[in-house]
Image (cartoon, rainbow, N blue to C red):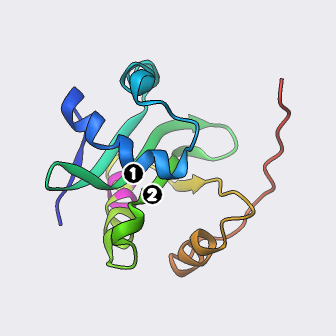
Amino acid sequence: MLVQLAKSDAQILQCFATLSQLRLHLKQETFLEQIHRQQLNGYQLALIEIENRGIAVAGFHISECLAHGRFMYIYDLVVDETVRSQQYGQHLFDWLVEYAKSHGCQQLSLDSGVQRFDAHRFYFRQRMNISSYHFSLSL
C-alpha cells in the first residue's frame, strides 16, 4: 500500500468522495479551491489510491506551539466506507506517525466527534489517549 501526498489537482479531487463521507457539508464544486486555500497555511492531504480513487485520506498540518512543541495535527482521517476494516486506515495512520517523526514532531493529535465510536476504538488501538476536552463556540 503506497501512501502519497496529493500534489496535483487530479490527486486532490480523487480524495473528495472519501473525504465527503466524513465531512458531509463539502461541495465538489468548491472543494479544490478550499484545499488550495488551506494548503497556503500548510495543510496537506495524504492518500492511498486505488483505481484513481483516494480510498484512505488524511488531511493534516505540522505546526508548533508552546503547549505541545512541534506537532502534527490531523484534521481529517477517513477510509472509504466500502473498504473499511481492510487495514487501509492502519497503514495510513502508521505512515502519518512516521511522517510526523521524520519532520521533528514530538506529538500527533486530532479531535474526534463524541458520536464516532468506531473511530474512538481505532484511536485507542493506536495507543492514543484522551488528553483534553475540545471546546468550541459557533460564531
Question: How busy is the neighbourhood of tag 2: few (under 14 within 10 Å), some, or many (20 plus)?
Answer: many
Q: Measuring from the top left, give residue 32's x and y in whole percent.
A: 36, 24
Asked if one can make out residue 39 in the rendered structure from this viewpoint, the answer is no
Principal secondary structure, stretch drawn in magenta: helix
Residue identifier under label 1? 18
Which corner quadrant of the image does residue 88 belong to? bottom left
Q: Measuring from the top left, give residue 23's x and y in whole percent.
A: 55, 44
Kind of element beneath mark 2? strand
Q: Quadrant of the C terminus?
A: top right
> Is residue 51 left or right of 119 when viewed as pictured?
left
Q: Which residues are magenta?
A: 96-100
Q: Measuring from the top left, give residue 65's x and y in whole percent.
A: 63, 36
Q: Earlier in the sequence, mark 1 or mark 2?
A: 1
Answer whether residue 14 is magenta in the image. no
Q: In the image, what residue type sits under mark 2?
A: Val
The tally of labels here is 2
Whether residue 100 is situated above or below residue 26 in the rendered picture: below
Q: Quadrant of the N terminus?
A: bottom left
Residue identifier under label 2? 78
Instruction: Determine contact: label 1, label 2, CB under 8 Å.
Output: yes
Real-space CA distance between mark 1 and mark 2, rounded to the nearest whole angstrom: 7 Å
Which corner quadrant of the image does residue 80 belong to? bottom left
> Is residue 97 left or right of 113 when viewed as pictured?
left
Q: Nearer the viewer, mark 1 or mark 2?
A: 1
Whether residue 23 is situated above or below residue 99 in the rendered picture: above
Looking at the rendered structure, which numbered label has been put on residue 96?
none
Q: Residue at x 43, y 32 (%)?
A: 43
> Is residue 83 left or right of 67 when viewed as pictured?
left
Give the camera-side residue of 111 and 100: 111
Q: In the image, what residue type sits under mark 1?
A: Thr
Give the camera-side residue of 7 and 99: 7
Asked if one can make out residue 119 in the rendered structure from this viewpoint, the answer is yes
